[in-house]
Amino acid sequence: MSNIKLTIDGKTLEVVKGTTILAAAQMADIKIPTLCFLKDRSAIGSCRVCVVEVEGMEYPLPACKTVARDGMVVTTSSERLTTYRRIALDLIVSNLSEEAWKVDEASSAADTNNNQLQTLCQEYGIETASFKTAAPPKPKYDSNPFLSFDPNLCIRCQRCVGACNSAARNHTLRTGKKGTRTTISAPFGKNWKSTECESCGNCAQACPTGAIKAKVKLNYQPGEVQTTRTTCPFCGVGCQIDLKTKDGKLVDVEGANGPANKGLLCVKGRYGSYNFVDSNDRIRTPLIKNKQTGEFEVASWDEALTLVTSRLSDIKKQHGGDSIAAFACSRSTNEDVYLFQKMARTVFETNNVDNCARV
Amino acid sequence: MVKLSIAPKSHADAQLTEYLETYARRIQATPPGMCPLALQLTLLQASAAQTCGKCVPCRDGLPQLAALFEKVVACQADESTLTQIKELARMVKGSSDCAIGYEAARSLLESMNTFAGEYSSHINNKVCTQDIEQTVPCETLCPAHVDIPSYIALVGEGDYAGAVNMVRKDNPFPTACAYVCEHPCESKCRRTLIDAPLNIRGIKRYAVDEAPVDTVPIPKRNPDTGRKIAVIGGGPSGLTCAYFLAQMGHAVTVFEAHKQIGGMLRYGIPAYRFPRERLDEDIQAILAVGGIEVKCEVTVDARQMKEIAETYDAVFVSIGAHVGKPLNIPGSDSKGVYSAVELLSTIGDGNYPDFTGKRVVVVGGGNVAMDCARTAVRSGAKSVGIVYRRRKEDMTALAAEVESAIAEGIDMILLAAPVSIETDEQGNCKALHMQPQLIGPVKGGRPTPVDANKDQVRIPADIVLMAVGQDIVTQPFEEYGMQAHRGAFVADEYLKAQGLENVFVGGDCQTRPATAIKAIAAGKVAARNIDEYLGYRHKLTCDVVSPEPHANDRTPMGRVDLIERPAHIRKNDFEDVELGMSLEEVKQECARCLRCDHYGCGEQEGGRVQYV
């Protein structure tokens, strides 16, 4: 693919043909404010916060969806752009409950993403909504056990729609395209069970205002948790996750940008992958069945492994490797399952290998 | 596999098409005198309703603009509201993603210039400007403010003579207007809300065909006032002025340069559109008022003008625009190249050209070009083409005229700009060379043609007729002391010539080439204002009573259009091309009239535009 040259704020850049102005600017560490833009998921240019001046154009263009052309001369800040961005933010916040955009220490905006509108409003000095209309508050959608949607906080930027449709490809969360009354049709209402929604929560992770909220986030404040990057143990896909711990307990998971998941998670990974850690049903030591009583009894790892090794060796000696089958648990990482089958083929000398990784 | 559907994407779209036609008709019938800001508000609201809901400037900006603008319309806004609107509109215009948003804001910003006076009145005086007041559409939009609902009702009742006199109250050329009026009265006819505008001109034509105006007695003239008024130019404007002045009792002398009076109605419009004998009916009726002396073949020069202005109590200058504009291209002085108005003027006195076997090319896209081309067809030309540098829809000629010309076998050579005229050794015209054009950017409301990257085109031509506009002979009058600006006389809205005491001026020579009805309106205005200038306030009687209205028949009904004689027949003669309505048709058409003089605004104080 050929390269093109463009100038942004006086810096000349060479980028691959097809690169957007925003992407080009980001490569050069030039900051263009964005709000509705969600990388690789949604670049519909709805918020108009990322508008930039392009030499020779009478009007500014949205950087997120405008492909850079050879010789383009872009300016990312001007009095006009600041005015337009301010008015865009002003129009946006005029429709919202103040908790969505007013910076308030006690606000429940827990997700780091949720501060985006607030951050922009602070940056552009939006303190009051000039176009405030007295609209009655709209009801929340709160029946889904994992997710809720508060239309009063929604800026209709459609990042959630991008997350659901082009990322998770669930195609359940849509825009109710009804002109000025456009809203997000979030399937979290009373009939949530009958929808196709898998409650994966990618929409909540995409939301810049906290209108769509993962309920788990109500349990902690952003400052109280530590983050640990790891691999989701729930299946073999290998999604990268950021585990959140509060006082030594796991409280939440966020999708990290790993090669397999690119920031996405499924409902199990997001809400189930860590919950079993502290489950009362969890078996914390090996158990060996007492043949007399028929009950499982606590054993050490050495005892347990010795028993398993001797029994399998005996079976192989008497009946041959083909008499053994190796069946792995799907709640294992891909790497564990790989090693397991390797052991089956080389040690047990059997090709009877399978697992239940069909989640 | 996903199933496909043949149903419209939105089921409402199917019904919407029909609905939108109704909507469009409502916009078309926007009543005259409506507050432009109230209209602008509806446009904003309509634009907001069209948003898909994606982008902030359009989805959130337009409703906010509408809300703010509502205050302006309600006269509750101040300068700060206007500043806020301007700032928001600029942002919506500058950062909307699609035309639904940015065009709405552009139009709002534009309205701030176009209707600056109205904005200022709403903001500062907290009211609409004084002339914002709805009046009967047809009557208002007729430049002569003819009482149209009344004469339609008279025709509907079969009182054709009454209808003629009802028209004559404001316009002494009922026949001319029945044949060639561009009928601005129809443009916002309220009937459009139900089906289509009335065919007002067609109805008038029925009246004058049934009751030729020279047979309809004219209301009695006022007693002599002893005042003398000169009218320079015996066209529709001059004769209208003469008619009303004579009615008032003044003595009028009409000075006419041509052999006969009638102006462009005789020397510009060919007989197949307006038969000469029918023009004579109007003229006979006008002269029958008495007190009008006509002096033909008198070309008034500066010295005479001075003399006239000193001898007469007042002068009305209405000399028209009779000189064809030249097109200065190489060869334009060769034999066989004529000005269109020259040709039409010659025909006016009955001297028809013989183009037998000739290839004729007419340059221009106005009504004069159509008249010339159709005249050439009737004069035996082997082929006739109209060369125009824009597109067909850009032609200034009436669409119906263009269609009729095409039907008569005239070639429309479009997007072609004349470059030169090729001649033989004797200096005779041989061909016209043209540069193909490309329609370009819109400037001043019209797309401008630019040279296309194509080779020049040659079209053989024995005769080239230039119909590229008309000039006004202002020079002798300027010498006398009248003011002219860019080739047209300068007057105020009351038609008083700038800088002169007793000289009035109007018609084509003041407006530049326009329509008969505008010239007639100018003549009427001049007559009234001369009367007033002389210290009178004459009232003229009409002697006809407007019939009582019937209740509106709201059943949608087609508009009766006038048809023309078959093209292959009509193109062989100079007889009238158009066929009038039948009795059945005229009755149906008159019954569609909603009588806006009685229903709606017409009934209330200030709802009419009438001179008493």
Image (spheres, grey):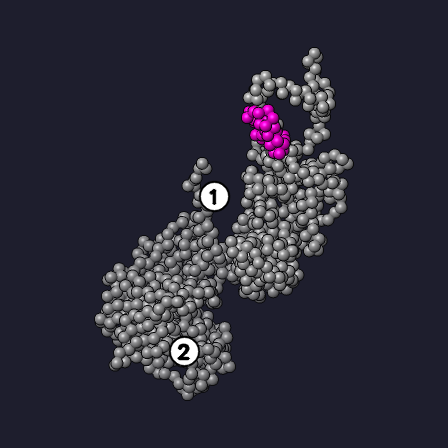
Q: Which of A247 and B568 is in front in this view?
A: A247
Secondary structure of residue under mark 2: loop
Task: Tell me the kind of residue under disc 1.
Answer: Ser
Instruction: Provide the secondary structure element on which disc 1 rests.
Output: loop
Query: In the figure, residue A222 lies in which quadrant?
Result: top right
Q: Confirm whether circles 1 and 2 share one chain.
A: yes
Residue B522 in percent (x, y) is at 44, 72
Residue linked to disc 1: B10
Taking A6 as reference, is B185 left or right? left
Determine whether, in the image, residue A101 is placed left or right of residue B519: right
Q: Mark 1 lies on which chain?
A: B
Residue B232 falls left or right of residue A351? left
Nearest the eye: A318 or B79: A318
Q: Is residue A341 magenta?
A: yes
Boundaries of the magenta span: A330-359
Mark 2 crowdedness (10 Å alpha carbons): few <14, some 14-19, many ≥20: many
Residue occupying the far left of the picture: B357
x, y percent for residue B399? 37, 62
Q: Is residue A340 above or below residue A86?
A: above
Q: Which chain carries label 2?
A: B
Identified at 60% across, 40% down, the residue is: A261
* Relative vertical location of residue B374 with respect to residue A35 in this rendering, above or below: below
Q: Which residue lies furthest to the top in this view?
A: A292
Q: Position of residue B237 (x, y in %)?
A: 40, 73
Compared across the picture, whether B233 is left or right of B44 comes to left
Q: Residue B472 carries which label?
A: 2
Mark 2: which amino acid?
A: Ile
